Image: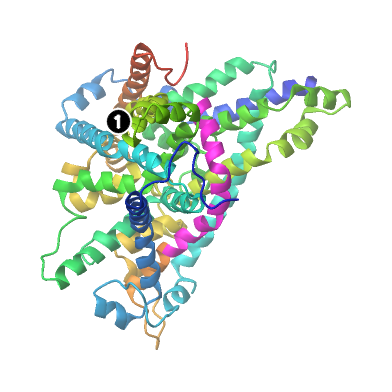
Amino acid sequence: MSVIDRPVWLGRPKPVAIALKALALVLISGVVIFPFLVVISTSLATKAEIDANGGYVLWPTHVSFDAYRQIFDGTQVSRSIVISVGVTVAGTAFSLFCTVLAAYGLSRRGSLFQRGLLTFVLVTLLFGPGMIPVYLMVKQLGMLNTYWALIIPGAVSAFNIVIIRGFIQGIPQELFDAARMDGAGEWRILWSIVLPLSKAVIAVVGLFLAVGYWNNYFGPLLYLNDSQMWPLQLVMRSFVLENHISSNATQIPGQIRPPAQSIQMALVVIATVPILCVYPFLTRHMSKGMLTGAIKG
Amino acid sequence: MVVLLLFTYIPLLGSVIAWMDYVPFLGFTGSDWVGWDNFTALFQDSAFWSAVWNTLQITFLQLLLFFPVPILLAVLLNTVAMPFARRFVQSVIYLPHFLSWVVIIALFQQIAGGAGVINRFLITHGASPLDIMTNPQIFKLLLTTQAIWKDAGWGTIIFLAAIAAIDQGLYESAVIDGAGAWNRFWHVTLPGMRPIIVLMLILRLGDSLTVGFEQILLQRDAVGPGAAEVLDTFVYYNGVIDGSWGAATAAGLLKGVVSLFLVLAANKLAHRLGEEGVYRR
């Protein structure tokens, strides 16, 4: 394990080149990290400090968690967090279930109509129906203003099916033959052979699905009219981008409200933290998943 | 083998869900047929053409400014010899891809908005503040900047993989022949990446009519529809908000058909130029 991993044909670069490169990398990372720093600091700052700085704080001298306390105090925000978590968990589970079954079915050569169905799925990659027909369909099914509308329409994507299917196809045929010889049925094969072997790819697809559900903003905007049902992303929009904060937050008598900026920024932090939590798992597998998907899709 | 039969019905169920949204357009015939009226009305609507024009402008800007960024970033990252520094930078620049547009725009608001970091800095140093977030004139540039911030890092993955697949022997012989860094980049790295670059370009061209829907929807009110209306938001506002379902669906369908045609055309062009393209045949 050396710290430096340079191909042999390349001589030692000049110090100037190293410095320039380092500077570029620091700048690039800085451009990404800096906004997060501002947001976290502001969410933790006190009112006096934010006012003194004119709206944001780079490094709070007095850390205060009032904004977070207020958010978790049973207002619309805490409800929206519960909703978001629920939709994300249910949606990911449902979506994975359908996708894995479809992928398995389509990966087995010789199953009924396999080729026709595969084309059927792949065409959706090239040609989508557009927003209005989807909306009308959801309406016809009576799913408007229900959480089903957030979960079902986008649950199965051809892209994910193709990724998982490609992986399942890589499992040696002998394993299937042996299992069948031992009397295993299709469900048994799926459960004891396919699932354990494709754990990694299923986990990656699942994580991407979860991130998608968590970040979904247009779905609820389109399908949910009742602001009581709003998930976090929509509440965040109305608080942070439209400044609806004062009318929505409950005022507790005898207590100074934390500054609006802090609450807004605390919301942004809360919307980001779950993603940061799954991020290490994502990075570990994602390049591989992305590439198989990109090459086959 | 009997159970296998059962299994084929489950993918069927899955496919039905993927297609479910498509059915109403064909089966939704309770109302009267109006022939091509919706389409002709659409073609006479100046708002529609303005949306098309805005969409194309944004696509062009993104091709010009956004598309090269991940390629250059990937080349830069590839020359970083310290594995730790490289992995760190990669982790950092992939991250914004996973954030929602609401978060991204909130971040931009905080940095570049009226009371944001940049303008506070300008004011405290005696300069006048800049109107960045709500200026229709530079809105398209703002969109492109946001897109770069969010997805340029993510885009490097595929180009990094392309560089990694280049035969190291080519570099060795290039060095022996006396090629400098620039020559190695121009004659080895770039040609090695070409198939992937072409592939990504095709995919992007096929998506020409799709430009950051959520991103624009969130900011449309700040700059007004004149600068921010694109095809997707046009469909949304006309159909769902104003209730002219027919015209909006026609616009959406038109977009789908044209996009399909664009993908096929771009792919054909790639074949013509001797590249592999998205699919073979």
In the image, taking residue A293 as reference, residue A94 lies left or right, namely right
> Among all residues in the image, which is located at the extreme right?
A182
Up the image or down, A124 lies above or below B99; here it is above
Question: What coloring was used for the rendering?
Answer: rainbow
In the image, taking residue A89 as reference, residue B158 lies left or right, namely left
Q: Which residue is mark 1?
A: B209
The image position of residue A254, as x and y in percent, is 39, 89
Who is closer to the viewer here, B171 or B200?
Answer: B171
Who is closer to the viewer here, B201 or A91?
Answer: B201
Residue B125 placement: quadrant: bottom left
Is residue A216 visible in the rendered structure shown here?
Answer: no
Indicate yes or no whether the magenta region holds residue A277: yes
Who is closer to the viewer here, B149 or A154?
Answer: B149
In the image, taking residue B212 as reference, residue B23 lies left or right, namely right
Residue in the picture at 42% in, 42% down = B79
Indicate yes or no whether the magenta region holds residue B184: no
What range is drawn magenta here? A269-297
The image position of residue A7, as x and y in percent, is 49, 39
The image position of residue A264, as x and y in percent, is 36, 67
Q: Chain of mark 1?
A: B
Q: Residues within 10 Å of mark 1 (few under 14, many from 20)?
A: many
Residue A130 placement: quadrant: top left
Who is closer to the viewer here, B224 or A275?
Answer: A275
Up the image or down, B167 lies above or below B218; here it is above
| SS at circle 1 | loop
The image position of residue B48, as x and y in percent, is 20, 32
Is residue B137 visible in the rendered structure shown here?
Answer: yes
Residue in the picture at 43% in, 17% down = B276
Magenta stretch, main secondary structure class: helix
Residue in the picture at 55% in, 31% down = A292
